[in-house]
Image: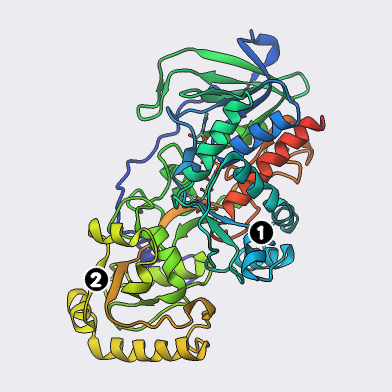
Amino acid sequence: MSEHTFNPTRRKLMQGIGVTGLAAVAAPSFAGDRYAKDVQWHQSHDFVIIGSGFAALAAAIEAKRKGIQSVAIYEQMPTFGGNSSINGGLFAVPGSPMQKQEGVKDSVDRMVDDQLKSGRGIADEALLRHVAEHANEALQMTLDAGAEYLPYLQQLGGHSAPRTYQTTVACGAGITQPLYKEAVQLGVEMHSRCRMSGFIRGDQGEVLGVTVETRYYADRKVSEGETLAIRANKAVLVATGGFSQNINLRMAQDPTLTADVGCTNIKGATGEAMLEMFRLGAVPVHMAHIQSGPWASPDEGGFGYVSNYSIYNFPHSMAINRMTGKRFMNEIADRKTRADAQLANRDAQGNPVPPLMITHYHDADKHPNCQKVLKYGVGWKFDTLEALAKHFDVPLAPLKAQIEQYNGYVKSGVDEQFGKPMAKAKDKYIKAPYMVVRLWPKVHYCQGGVKINQLAQVEDSLTGQPIKGLLAAGEVAGGIHGVSRLGSCSIPECMVMGITAARTVAAGKA
Ligand SMILES: Cc1cc2nc3c(=O)[nH]c(=O)nc-3n(C[C@H](O)[C@H](O)[C@H](O)COP(=O)(O)OP(=O)(O)OC[C@H]3O[C@@H](n4cnc5c(N)ncnc54)[C@H](O)[C@@H]3O)c2cc1C
């Protein structure tokens, strides 16, 4: 087959297991950028922040702490927090206090090395290092605000050490809610249902403010209020997250990511503010690298209960191909490696056959989601292997042989099949009773976005210079992680780059 031959199986690759069945999201008509000489300002603040996830909240708090007087957040949704508030609450920090307690050896270099591997040669090493170096400060900001974490660390796929904290509520709201309260206490102005619809620029092309549509209803994509011109005396920070829910845009990058493919994100993750920055001249980077989460279940919508359950259980579980009864991947490889391996689980006609993750029930049950997974019928418990094989139509003899072989690796501590690190599987044999969930990847995270530098400044594609008055942080910024972000590395990135943006403003460098 020539390089340019259309390959129908690739088109079908992600299809066939649609959970969300979303209609394509049409890009709303944006006001585009305007020039300040035509504008009558309605409101004015020193620091105007668009969005209200980790990046925005961290920036707002740090700005106030640095003495910036007037800080305002504009959020298009009726509630604050964005994807950050529904996320898994998993937060990677190298050299953290809990690593010291648990005697885990780790370092900034080691975390950056892990991320560079997963980034497959195109990650931004300087930005990754900047984030890793400041991750402890970001963690401390959440602790100071009252966030609470489980008393143990997790080792996620592609990480060479246990370095991931998780909120006690196993959800990002365990961080965004305390940060929101802290921001309000510090005097940050919060505006919901306010959608930023364009930039307002000065004579030299610098960003002086934004237009905001008030009383915005994201579900209907209409504004029932007025369009306000908001002056930003020092800078505008765009912290509007990724575009995983923009079907047209993601299909323009990868035609296999159709509306049928499940997605873990909130509906507001459509990326128009990023497109506005491209219109200003920002550099688009790595837009085609859209990550699918290899821990998601085809049996529930969005992130659901299974995702966090399987993230916790992968290190001591076995994932098998239903048709062969055999393993097909290192269960804690990086996300792209696992998602690609899962997507190859197909019948002779190319239809998806979601693989199974098998765990000893009493190990699985240590995760708070285990009972929810059972309660909502998205996971199954079996007393015997025969019952499991019958239920999922898995050939019993090869399955039995695979379990024996895998248990040998648990005993020896060496996975001879796929090289999975077995430290976290120690003494955790696959045995009755069994717990099973089905796996199929869902669109989860955009590695692409606008190019930023270590001051969170947005670079202009023609001049290579920062666009004056404009900063970006969080998932809207691209290129940091390269081909594939490691799990739990977005929270530190969003928070550190939000904090960095505030420091850039405070230093008069925006
Ligand atoms: C289900 C799920 C689980 C995840 N779990 C983890 C995890 O455990 N650990 C981890 O590190 N990462 C995780 N991630 C990734 C991580 O949560 C996101 O990358 C991160 O939350 C992005 O934060 P942000 O601050 O960039 O933007 P967001 O939190 O996405 O917030 C952006 C906000 O901007 C608003 N907005 C957009 N456009 C406009 C506009 N024009 N005007 C006004 N407002 C606008 C949006 O409504 C939204 O509220 C997860 C993601 C998802 C979806």
* Mark 1 residue element: helix
* Residue 457 seen anywhere in this rendered image of the structure: no
Closest to the observer, 90 or 98 = 98
* Mark 2 residue element: strand
Kindly report which numbered mark, 1 or 2, lies closer to the viewer in this rendering: 1
Q: Is residue 270 above or below residue 359?
A: above
Instruction: Classify residue 42 by image quadrant.
Output: top right
Q: Is residue 34 above or below residue 447?
A: above
Which amino acid, mark 2?
Lys
Q: Is residue 417 above or below residue 11?
A: below
Q: Position of residue 366 (x, y in %)?
A: 39, 66
Q: State which quarter of the image contains the C terminus.
A: top right
Q: Earlier in the sequence, mark 1 or mark 2?
A: 1
Closest to the observer, 417 or 314 = 314
Residue tagged 1: 97
Residue tagged 2: 381
The count of marks equals 2
Q: Position of residue 438 (x, y in %)?
A: 31, 67
Q: Position of residue 32 (x, y in %)?
A: 57, 24
Distance in Å between CA atoms under marks 1 and 2? 37 Å
Instruction: Classify residue 241 by image quadrant.
Output: top right
* Residue 301 seen anywhere in this rendered image of the structure: yes
Q: Residue at x 43, y 54 (%)?
A: 443
Which amino acid, mark 1?
Pro
Q: Position of residue 248 (x, y in %)?
A: 43, 43
Q: Residue at x 57, y 26 (%)?
A: 184
Q: Residue at x 63, y 42 (%)?
A: 144
Indicate left or right for 351 with 83 as reference: left
Q: State which quarter of the image contains the N terminus.
A: bottom left
Indicate left or right for 109 with 215 as reference: right
Q: Residue at x 34, y 73 (%)?
A: 362
